[in-house]
Amino acid sequence: MIGRPPLNVRIAVTAIFASLIAVGTFFSIPVPQPLYEITWSPAIYLALSVFVDSGTAFSATAIGGFIGEAINIAYKGGSPIYPFGMVWARGPEVLIVIWGARKGRKWLAASMVIATVFETLAFFFPDWLFYNYGLFQYSVPTGSTGLGLAAFDFGTLVDLAWIPVAFGIIYAAGPAFKRLGFRSNLQEPKQP
């Protein structure tokens, strides 16, 4: 079970990690439209999910993803729906990882994979509808289909590459989170 440090510590951790996630979302790897970018923030929020309670992890991920993507839209252009898509797709990812961590080490990596697949599908299905119905500045060029353009969302599966990085963060930052009063979501095997 996870520890609950004082509210001021949880708010500070939320603010710090929301900032890191926002920076990780803004400083992204550009890729062609319609995918636009690959961000490095998944390593941060996947690791954070192991250390903190669900409210702190969800808040930091949702706020950071929204702010980072809003800055991207302001500087690089794109649909105003993108920041909301980050909340819709990435917020639940941390809840999936927390669930897996609470089941033990064997489930942690699997839950990170499941969370990344969820994120991909959470982008894919709405984008498919947005392209088909021309919503939120989405349009389908001649010779393309909404399904074909939405299929580019499967490129977000490249986020699977961030899972080993998240494990590195988990092992490196664990002691610092313990000092802050957080107990890991990761269930250790019971000793006989």
Image (tube, helix red, strand yellow):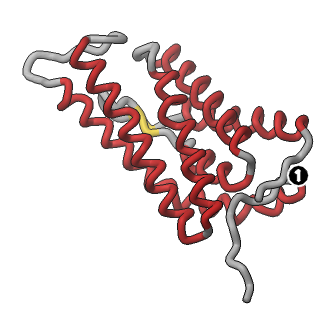
Identify the residue at image location x=44%, y=41%. 119
Q: Where's the C terminus, which quadrant?
A: bottom right
Q: Which residue: 30% across, 18% down?
A: 130
Which residue of the protein is positioned furthest toward the left in this rendering? 143
Q: Amino acid at mark 1?
A: Leu
Check disc 1 and report the residue beneath it.
180
How dense is the environment of label 1, judged by Cα within 10 Å: few (below 14), some, or many (20 and up)? some
* Snapshot quadrant of residue 139: top left
In percent of width and height, residue 59 lies at 68, 33
Report the front residue among 45 and 53: 53
* Residue 26 on image: x %, y %: 55, 30
Q: Secondary structure at mark 1?
A: loop
The location of residue 166, given as percent across then percent down, is: 59, 57
56 displayed left or right of 144: right
The N terminus lies in quadrant:
bottom right
Tell me which corner region of the image, top left, top right, bottom left or bottom right, holds residue 171: bottom right
Examine the rendered structure and indicate whether residue 85 appears above or below residue 142.
below
